[in-house]
Amino acid sequence: MVRARSGRLAAVAVAVLLGLSACGTEYSTPADRPGPRQANEVTIGVAGDEGTLTPYTHQTGYPGRNLVALVYDTLLDRDQHNELKPLLATGVEANQDNTAFTVPLRTDVRWHDGKPFTAADVVFSVDYHRQHPEGDSVPAIANVTAVTPRADTVDTVVFTLAAADPDFPSRLLADLRILPEHVWSTIDAPETATVEQAVGTGPYRLTKYTKDQGYELSANAEYPIGRPKIKTIKIAIIPEQQTGIAALRTTEVSVLSGQLPAEQAAGLRRQPGVRIAHGSSFTSTLLAFNNGRAPFDDPTVRAAISAAIDQQSLIDTVLRGGGQPGSPGFWHPDAAGADTALRHDYDPKHAAELLDKAGATPGQDGIRVLAGKPMSYPLLVQSENPRRVRAAELIRDMLSEVGIAVKVSAMDSDSVDAKVWPELDVGKGRDYDLAMWGWSAPVMLDPTSMSDILDADTSVGRLNITGTNDADIDGAAGRLRDATTTDDRRAALRDLQGLVEAKVPFVTLYYPEDSFGYRSDVYDGWVYQEGQGLLAKQSFVDLRW
Amino acid sequence: MVGRLAARLGEYGIVLAAAVILNFALPRALPGSPLRTVAGGESAGALPTETQARLLRSYGLDQSLWRQFLDYVRDLANLDLGNSFVDGSPVAEAIGRALPWTLLLVGSSLVLTVLIGVATGALAGYRRRVGKGNGLLSGALLLDSIPSFWLGMLLIALFGVTLGLLPTFGVGAGFADPGDLAGHLVLPVLTLTLTGFGQFFLVTRSSMLAVLSADHIEHARARGIGSARRIFRHALRPALLPAHTVLMIEIGYLVGGALVVETVFAYPGLGRVTFDAIRAKDFPVMQGTFLVLTLTVVVLNAVADATYALIDPRVRRPAVAT
């Protein structure tokens, strides 16, 4: 029988009850001494099924890609500070103009079925990803014109690019999962890859998969790149967050992949054996303007709205202090290439002056009138995201102070998508005024994603959901894409951040801090990868790089 | 008789045809695009337009709705429910994998629900003027109004977290370890039973109240028939007819699973398959699970029609004009 009577009140009541159940017991604060750095068995709670854990069958970026990374390796990887390190490769050497990259490979790596990993697998993987670009980890592969084993040696490949790309190692070599040719050459439909075909070189072998229930992975004792720290990793699929938290309390799970709400984190902190890992997140939360619709086609109006928003108040109220203010240039201050000098100025007086300048005059009920129309607009927000709903309500109150009326319109995220990003194709236009939005953490790892978000050419600006159309921004975005050296790219990235601050195509509100709960009495070898979270590869392997 | 049967079958045919159309139309009426699912995740929007178009084409989503509907009906006629957008596996497999779990969970709770609901309903009807009867009524009304999500979380907090007596999620080792499985079933079954028995209680109590004031009960009392026989034979049997109707409706919903409870307890049943399919906009799986649910309700309604006569002989008598 379908019973869908549960509601938000019930969820709140349960959260309170779970909190009380923690308070009712006498809990000491966790001891400072570290827990075990190795474990026989660790159970990870995840929210959904991730298919057969291949590069083509997982469902989410996080935690799906992180779990796939336990089975499949890339040529390079990122350490906890997001610095590139060799993994299946032993190094990378670029030619002078960054159009060819020579990658020597390890010779001591074997696939999980015992066959040796070779340069042919790398060549095959590039071809396969080119033919089947529908995987979630679609690499920026179009720029690669050839991948060839070097003539003088069997364990080195050379990537030749059509255009120079100084970030090629980051964009492709650290992203492309290497597939075994002897297994995947027979797979025509990659989304149907089975458990038996989930053969990688990674530190763990997939030994069991029960759909909708979970996984079991066993340490790959022959992994030459590092020592797995856990013998058996179990992954339990728990869709409901509150159930996952209860399971963490009962030790049925050892770590939760999902972020903890601040209220829950506070309760768990008192639980013996449980620790909360905090860290910066590259996830962004934005106030998006429809730049193609009046009055949001006027940079002065956008700047006025930006100045009327008190970021710190949002962080204090919505995130309980657990977050960083958004950079006016969008780029996270901890991400490579950030212009850390940029600061958001909350100044309602200046906001009012800007609105005056834009021609908005005081009207009845305190709502300004612009071009004969009251400045009253709906703000779309995803109803299943309580943080964003609360932030939207606060923004409504802030904008009312400067004479702009906002009606918060909460709807399910698919409905918001349908208006902001119809059919996930920015070329199909948009139908909104204001919307709460956000981009996931990997955006901050690739500088050219700024071009994806801002370029008016929709064949390039595939993520330009604001309909930004500005010649200066397009120029800087082009320079960013076409840069042939790292220095040039960083310079273009800074230019672009400056232009975003000046033209305000959207307001970057904040970057929420991530909080993850884990049982330190079961396993305490977790490594927090900056901006990415707790399920980094280094959490599971002592990598020798 | 044959004419009446044919008319009834015709009615069921119309219901099924309407259900097939709705099963096709409803998923497509949802906002948003299934592209995210067929493209394998979050980066779907960043794919080049040609790649997006190719993906939609490969799943037939570039066709007109009319063409898609004809293909759906054609496949259905061949007993083919299609393949999931998510992993390409046959929908029938997903349903077949989840169905036993749902039958186990909802079937167990339904048995308990009926037994407890009917027994306490009959008792409350019989003792309607004393505290026990009124206490049962209050308790049943309270439990019937509690959302299963909330009760499930309360039970997890109490029996799982605070007392540490029972597992909080999943099915453990499953059928390979029946003892472990039974332990995992306790909380979800208890949740469904406690939130579900109220309707059987209320229907049985109300029916008992009506029957106990009927002439034939007074007649039985006057004949000196003992109270136990009077209740179980003369009162409870006719009072069960409405409960039987409710039971048939509930069994019809049985394969729909307990969507919320399965989600709360991370239970791998049909309700969760449906829930996941709706979230992922997996049209074929949504169509398949909706169809199975519809078919079961229709078939069980037919069974209810056919079995009324077994419980109430009056249904078998021909109508008499007065």
Image (tube, coloured by chain):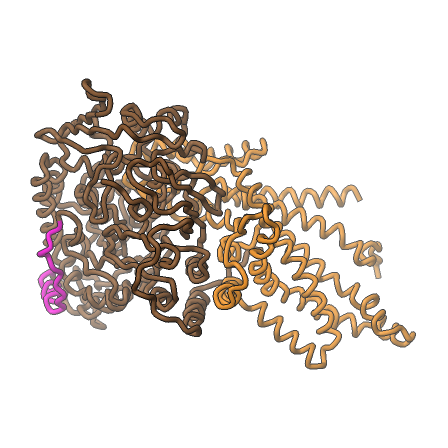
Chain colours: A brown, B orange
Tell me the quarter of the picture where residue B98 sits.
top right
> In the shown orientation, is residue A232 left or right of residue A160?
right
Residue A9 visible in image = no
Q: Residue at x 51, y 53 (%)?
A: B170
* Screen quadrant of the N terminus of chain A: bottom right
Query: In the image, is residue A345 part of the stretch drawn in magenta?
Result: yes
Tell me the quarter of the picture where residue A482 sits.
top left
- When the figure is inspected, residue A91 is found, relative to residue A279, above or below; the finding is above
Q: In this orientation, which residue lies closer to the viewer: A166 or A274?
A: A274
What residue range appears in magenta? A338-358
Q: Residue at x 52, y 63 (%)?
A: B152
Q: Residue at x 54, y 45 (%)?
A: B289
Residue A365 picture location, percent across and down = 23, 73
Residue furthest to the bottom in view is: B130
Residue B71 picture location, percent across and down = 50, 32
Q: In this orientation, which residue lies closer to the viewer: A395 or B171?
A: B171
Q: How many marks?
A: 0
Residue B157 picture location, percent across and down = 48, 66
Residue B8 picture location, percent across and down = 71, 45
- When the figure is inspected, residue B236 is found, relative to residue A485, above or below; the finding is below
